[in-house]
Image: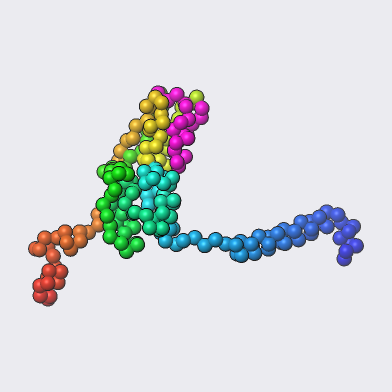
Amino acid sequence: MIEAIAQQPILAALIALVGLGILFGALLGFAAEKFKVEGDPIVEQIDELLPQTQCGQCGFPGCRPYAESIASGDAINKCPPGGQATINSIANLLDVPAPELDAEHGEEADLRTVAYIREDECIGCTKCIQACPVDAILGAAKLMHTVIANECTGCDLCVEPCPVDCIDMLPVQETIKEWHWPAPPTTADLIASDRSPSAIGGPQL
């Protein structure tokens, strides 16, 4: 068998490569299991509730670092893009009281916005590209830039660096994709005549 393989150098090389592949694959699989780092599930859940704008208004470089800080005990009301709805969701997840949005970090916007570059005024400085945390701006040095609207999170970090002030934040018109049924009012929001008898302590039929 060995002599037959020795007489076929190509076959011998293929067998050697397959053997090495199996050996290194087994070693990598073992190392992945042996040294696997378990993530914190609560961080994952908090991160999923955050709006993923990566705007930095909370004082952290992105949503994930803020989620890690919240899991370590930081305040949950530092996210203006998420607004009160996100605060309430995180409070419900952590089973803590829901505070109001911290005005020090900004105000909740009524409408979602996206960046728009007035392309005829763009000088191609690339400063907005460097500022965008989600790579939603296309362009090159000394060439026109444009925004990928579907990728833009509306963080407005690209506005201030622009030396010619050619970036506007425009409101996004609500479409069937963004529209959703409003949440039903809680019992506390109902007047007495709208509540069911059981909710106001009356007789049940």
200 inside magenta stretch: no
129 inside magenta stretch: yes
The C terminus - image quarter = bottom left
Q: Residue furthest front?
A: 73
Q: Residue at 34% across / 54% down in the picture?
A: 75
Give the side of residue 58 with respect to residue 40, left or right.
left
| Residue 178 in sight from this viewpoint | no
| Residue 148 in sight from this viewpoint | yes
Q: Nearer the viewer, residue 76 or 1?
A: 76
- Specify the segment rendered in magenta: 121-141
Q: Quadrant of residue 57?
A: top left
Question: Where residue 104 sits in the image (x, y, percent)?
Answer: 30, 44
* Magenta stretch: dominant secondary structure: loop
Question: Where residue 112 sits in the image (x, y, percent)?
Answer: 31, 42
The N terminus - image quarter = bottom right
Q: Nearer the viewer, residue 83 or 150?
A: 83
Question: Where residue 181 sits in the image (x, y, percent)?
Answer: 26, 54
Q: Residue at 44% across / 51% down in the picture?
A: 65
Q: Residue at 60% across / 64% down in the picture?
A: 33
Q: Is 179 placed above or below 116 here?
A: below
